[in-house]
Amino acid sequence: YALQVLPVNYAGLALILVGVALMVAEAFAPSFGALGLGGFATVNIPDVPGLSFTGMAHYAPDILAFGDSQDMTSLELRGSYRVIRNAEVFAGYRYLNTDFEDFPGDLNLDEGVLAGMKLYF
């Protein structure tokens, strides 16, 4: 009875079902991907409210890489400033590298400066 009273967002339910269907399809038709090991750390600067610095690092060795990927490395350094309660601007550097079976040497998928705005809802 209690579940009949709860409101249901049908668009959200549809997106969850699409996600589950894609995960099941990935099990039968694997493509490029990897299970990464890593994490991130954020430092908030107490003297300047809203200013923070974040570092992220993820690595997927050969044993955890799927499809044609041999290994993957992802590094990102980012500084951000919260301009209003629901938005922050950020700038930083990103490095994303992988090694494919049939491609000679490593392949840089993304390397360089990034900037953007993150909105919170």
Image (cartoon, rainbow, N blue to C red):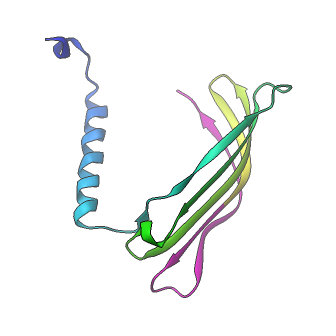
Q: Is residue 92 left or right of residue 100?
A: right
Q: Name the residue at 72% across, 30% down.
A: 82
Horizontal and vertical percent position of residue 26:
28, 61
Residue numbers of the magenta segment: 95-121
Figure check: 4 above or below 118? above
Q: Residue at the location (25% across, 67% down)?
A: 29
Task: Identify the residue at horizontal 62%, vertical 37% (top origin).
Answer: 118
Query: Which quadrant, please, contains the N terminus?
Result: top left
Q: Residue furthest right?
A: 47
- Give the percent coordinates (x, y) of residue 88: 68, 33
Q: How many marks?
A: 0
Q: Is residue 2 magenta?
A: no
Horizontally, residue 26 falls left or right of residue 80, namely left
Q: Quadrant of residue 33?
A: bottom left
Queried whether the magenta region covers residue 106, the answer comes back as: yes
Residue at the extreme left: 1
Q: Quadrant of residue 10?
A: top left
**Residue 46 picture location, percent across and down:** 81, 26
The image position of residue 19, as x and y in percent, is 30, 46
Front residue of 119/53: it is: 53
76 left or right of 72?
right
31 shown above or below 92: below
